Image (tube, helix red, strand yellow):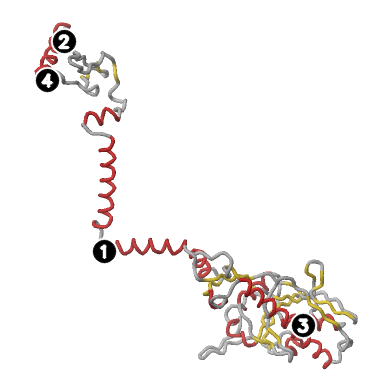
Amino acid sequence: MVRSKHSQTNGRRTSAARRGRHATVSPSVRRRSTGVTKGLRVAPSNGARSESEGIVDTGSEPQNPRNVASTRGGSGSQVTANGWRGLLDKVRYLFLGHSLRYLAGMICAMLCLIVLVLPSPYVIETPGPTQDVLGKVHGKEVISVGDVDSHATTGKLLMLTVNTQGAPGGSHNLGVQTLIAWIAPAQYAIPTEAIFPVGQTRDQYMKISAIQMSNSQKSATAAALDYAKERGIDGADTAKVSVHIGDIGGSSAGMMYALGVLTKLTPEDETGGKTIAGTGTIDKKGEVGEIGGIQLKMLAAKRDGATYFLAPAANCNEVVGHVPSGLRVVKVSTLDEAYRSLEAIGNGRDADLPYCTATRPGVDQRQN
């Protein structure tokens, strides 16, 4: 048996020599026997490669990448080129191997993703904080009445605000934020130019809002004192009223300021211990005017514990169908209506107070 093996090996060497003196047998070429193989010995002739005899488990050991490349006659650059060709083939298949409808869908999806991460031309409004005009801000009374006796109350009169995100000069809202605002019930996405005139800076907007707030406080004080004089409330002729609210701007709190002044001038507790919210502009004649964001303000009122909401009659179309559960909305057009409604609520006689109805053509429904 030994002699036979040598004769077979010599025959292979002679055959290899005939094919060429420089022929090399790859280490990956093995003769399998009983689970292991022996390396083939090739006589080193003129620089020919040789391999010593050894035992290799060809069934479990991976081939060396260098040997694979060498055996196939390729190089590293060729392998890289093949990788790029494969990538190009996939791209060709993506665009040429599908229908136009599929490609159109892919392009639309890509464009949608891009839009979601780009700044959007919308501002986002959400329910803002509330403030009790009968309370304090930073330790200072919101409404102080001097030179007369000021009367305390057990309830609250909440003025309301709306938060605006994406104002000029600040951070822009992304498309995905705008999309969420369109879907979420407590957020509104509004075109920026609908809130901020084109070209208006943040500083200009803040300055205008501060002026509106100051004018609103003056109008509310004048209307409240005139109304108090008409009703014969003591101290109305000599009272000195000042309002301090902090960094809140706008004119929509005028009506609540006027009610706060009247409540502090009178000995009665008009609130009856209840939390009553409201909004609306007011002029010196006591006329209550329309405001913006009333649906968000109703949400803020409900969130902060209000059970009654005084709304301008001019806003009733926006109120109907959007009143939060548990909130009673009373419509008012003048300071007199607002004050009488406040007294009725405090005394528990609110059943007959006017509510909002929609006045749009073809629509006739109650507020809630």
Q: Earlier in the sequence, mark 3 or mark 4?
A: 4
Q: Could you classify mark 2 by the number of other residues whose Cα lies within 10 Å: few (under 14), some (14-19), or many (20 or more)?
A: few
Q: Residue at x 27, y 57 (%)?
A: 95
**Can you identify the residue that label 2 sits on?**
5
Locate residue 139: give its quadrant.
bottom right
Q: CA distance from mark 3 to mark 2?
A: 116 Å
Q: Are marks 4 and 2 in contact (CB under 8 Å)?
A: no
The residue sitting at the bottom extreme is 230
Task: Report the disc number at residue 259.
Answer: 3
Going from N to C along the chain, the mark reached first, 4 or 1, is: 4
Task: First in sequence, mark 2 or 1: give its number.
Answer: 2
Horizontal and vertical percent position of residue 133 = 77, 75
- Which residue is rendered at x = 61% and y = 85% of the image? 316
Q: Which numbered marker is on residue 20?
A: 4
Q: Nearer the viewer, mark 2 or mark 1?
A: 1
Q: Nearer the viewer, residue 261 or 153?
A: 261
Q: CA distance from mark 3 to mark 4?
A: 112 Å
Q: Amino acid at mark 4?
A: Gly
Residue 139 drawn above or below residue 319: above
Q: Position of residue 161 (x, y in %)?
A: 66, 74
Q: Which amino acid type is shown beneath numbered disc 1?
A: Leu
